[in-house]
């Protein structure tokens, strides 16, 4: 039986967070028929020749995500963010999913659970066709919903040489067992979806198979903090 390490998204994914300040500078165009946020390095010479695939959380390509991708681009990466929700991320419907009676998250999840995987597979193939070349290397980062896409891209079926997952959801043991490239895991110390026991099990799997990995655990933050800046504990805020 394929045991669950990180549970499906739930209410903890939608605690009120903070909106980043600024204006996104990337552009959106289709790659393989899929809307893609593209943020490019500064032409002054910061480009490092690496392509970073960005797999978003349930909110999709909203402001915080786009501004984060711009920051990655400022560090020299060509960043490609996939809209595997086809314009139907949670942010399209509401900014307060916990208190909005018109939004049915369970129905939304079932609508996109499988389709996002199909879309991502088509998208990655098209990314390779357009951007692969001599000296080009791919990396990836995934938040919550996007975590399992990172594990796939780090497997023998993927294209990435290194990856990062933050506060994952929908993650199973086989996802971690399949990882063949360096993996960096970022998690809150207290995460309802990815608790200590499951986090330790993920580390155990990676250690037993001799994989290269690192785990960074942060106290005083909640699930979703890496994108939405969720700080539910007063001491952390102060």
Image: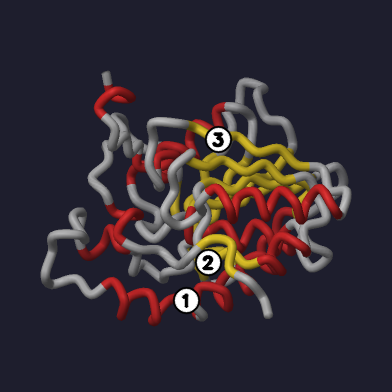
| Count of all numbered marks drawn on residues in the image | 3
Upstream in sequence: badge 1 or badge 3 = 1
Q: What is the residue that sits farthest to the top in this orientation?
A: 238
Give the quadrant of residue 215.
top right
Tag 2 residue:
170
Q: Which element is circle 1 on?
A: loop
Asked which quadrant contains residue 135, the reply is top right
Left or right of 91: which side holds 45? Answer: right
Separation of marks 1 and 3 at Cα, in angstroms:
27 Å
Q: Is residue 58 above or below residue 15?
A: below
Q: How is this picture coloured?
A: secondary structure
Residue at (35%, 42%) from the top-left corner? 228
Say what secondary structure mark 3 lies in: strand
- Residue 61 percent across, percent down from the top left: 40, 54
Tag 1 residue: 113
CB within 8 Å, label 2 to label 1: yes
Judging by the rendered image, the residue that carries numbered circle 3 is: 217
Q: Nearer the viewer, mark 2 or mark 1?
A: 2
| Residue at position x 53%, y 61% in the image | 6
Q: Is residue 45 above or below residue 187?
A: above
Q: Mark 3 or 2 closer to N-term?
A: 2
Secondary structure type for disc 2: loop
Q: Tell me: 46 left or right of 13.
A: right
- Above or below, comparing residue 177 to residue 163 in the picture: below
**x and y, in percent, of residue 102 in the image:** 13, 72
């Amino acid at each position: 039986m394929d045991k669950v390490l990180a549970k499906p998204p739930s209410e903890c994914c939608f605690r009120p967070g903070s909106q980043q300040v600024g204006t996104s500078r990337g552009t959106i165009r289709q790659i393989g028929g899929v809307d893609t946020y593209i943020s490019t390095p500064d032409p002054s010479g910061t480009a490092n020749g690496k392509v970073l695939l960005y797999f978003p959380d349930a909110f999709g390509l909203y402001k915080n995500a786009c501004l984060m991708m711009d920051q990655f681009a400022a560090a020299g990466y060509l960043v490609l963010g996939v809209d595997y929700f086809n314009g139907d991320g949670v942010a399209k419907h509401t900014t307060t999913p916990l208190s909005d009676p018109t939004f049915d998250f369970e129905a939304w999840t079932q609508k996109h659970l499988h389709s996002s995987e199909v879309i991502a597979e088509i998208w990655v193939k098209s990314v390779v066709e357009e951007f692969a070349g001599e000296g080009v290397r791919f990396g990836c980062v995934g938040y919550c919903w996007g975590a399992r896409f990172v594990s796939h891209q780090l497997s023998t079926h993927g294209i990435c040489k290194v990856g990062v997952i933050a506060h994952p959801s929908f993650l199973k043991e086989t996802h971690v067992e399949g990882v063949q490239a360096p993996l960096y895991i970022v998690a809150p110390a207290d995460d309802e979806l990815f608790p200590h026991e499951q986090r330790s099990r993920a580390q155990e799997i990676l250690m037993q198979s001799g994989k290269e990995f690192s785990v960074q655990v942060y106290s005083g933050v909640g699930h979703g903090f890496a994108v939405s800046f969720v700080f539910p504990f007063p001491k952390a805020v102060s």
